[in-house]
Image (cartoon, rainbow, N blue to C red):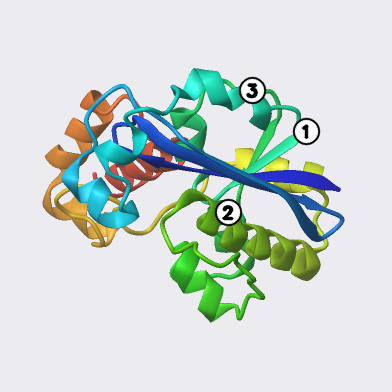
Amino acid sequence: MSFRVIDTETCGLDGGVVEVASVDVVDGQLCNAMSDLVNPDRPIGHEAMAIHHITEAMVEDKPRIAKVIGRYHGSPYYVAHNAAFDRRMLPEMQGQWICTVKLARKLYPGLKYGNQYLRYALNLEVTVPEGLYPHRALYDCYVTAALLVKIINDSGWSAEEMAALCNEVTLLTTMKFGKYRGQPMERVALEDPGYLKWMLKNLKDLSGDMRFSINHYLNQSS
C-alpha cells in the first residue's frame, strides 16, 4: 500500500497556505519527504505565526501554492490529521483522502486526538529529521505517518476500508472551535441552541461531522 501523508501550515483558520509538506508511506516505510514554503494570498495572522513561527519575511519571495502543488500530485491516497482542513486549504488533489483523526476516534475511543497527544498516548515510533519542530508541516507529517502505520498495524484495515470509514460521518462530543471550544456539544445545545443554529446558517465551511453533530444534538434537545 502507498500513501502520501500531507500537511499545511496557514495564515489562520480561514486559509492562506504558508507551507506544504508530505512524506510517503510505502509498505509501512517512510520515504520521499518534500516541503515548500509558500507565499500566501493574505497576511499571516499573529496567532498562526505564534504556532508555526513562519514569518512574512520567510515567505515573501516564495511561490504561490499553485506553483508548487504539482509535485505533490500523483498519489492514490492522501492522508492528513484532520483531512477536511488540509483538503480545503489545497487546490484540488486527485486521489482519495484518509483522515487519521477520524480513524483514531474509531480505533482508540476515549482519548484526545491532537497529533502530539496521540504520539505519546499511543507510544508512536517517530523519527524526525534534525532541525524540525512541532507545527512545521514536515514535522507534523512524520508524526501523522507514524500514526497511520500504527492504525494499519492495529486495525488491519485496507486503504479502501480506511477511505470508506473516513467518508462516514462521525458524531462529535465536544465543540472544536468558537466561544464554547472544548465544552460538551450536548450541553451547548441545551443552554445556547441559538448559537449552534447560527453556526449552521453562517459557517458554510463546517465539516460534515460538525454539521451532522450539531443537528443531532439540536434534535435531541428539542
Residue 141 is labelled as: 2
Can residue 201 be seen in this snapshot?
yes
Task: Calculate the distance from the C-alpha at mark 1 to the C-alpha at mark 2.
Answer: 17 Å
Instruction: Give the number of marks.
Output: 3
C-alpha distance separating marks 3 and 2:
18 Å
Q: Secondary structure at mark 1?
A: loop
Give residue 158's position: percent from left, percent from top. Answer: 83, 51
Image depth: mark 3 or mark 2 in front = 3
- At a point 33% along the width and 40% down the height, the residue shown is 58
- Indicate the position of residue 45 as horizontal and vertical percent values: 20, 40
Q: Is residue 196 left or right of residue 131?
A: left
User: Which residue in the protein does label 1 denote?
Assistant: 76
Residue 213, position as x, y percentages in the image: 39, 45
Q: Secondary structure at mark 2?
A: helix
Q: Secondary structure at mark 3?
A: helix
Badge 1 local density, few (<14 within 10 Å), some, or many (20+)? some
Observer-side mark, 3 or 1, equals 3
Sequence order check: which comes first, mark 3 or mark 2? 3
- Is residue 10 found left or right of 93 in the rendered image? left
Is the residue 135 above or below the residue 33 in the image? below
Residue 110 versus residue 64 in the image, above or below? below
Kindly identify the amino acid type of the residue bearing the numbered disc 2: Cys
The answer to whether residue 202 is above or below residue 57 is above
Q: Which residue is mark 3?
A: 70
Does residue 111 appear in this view? no
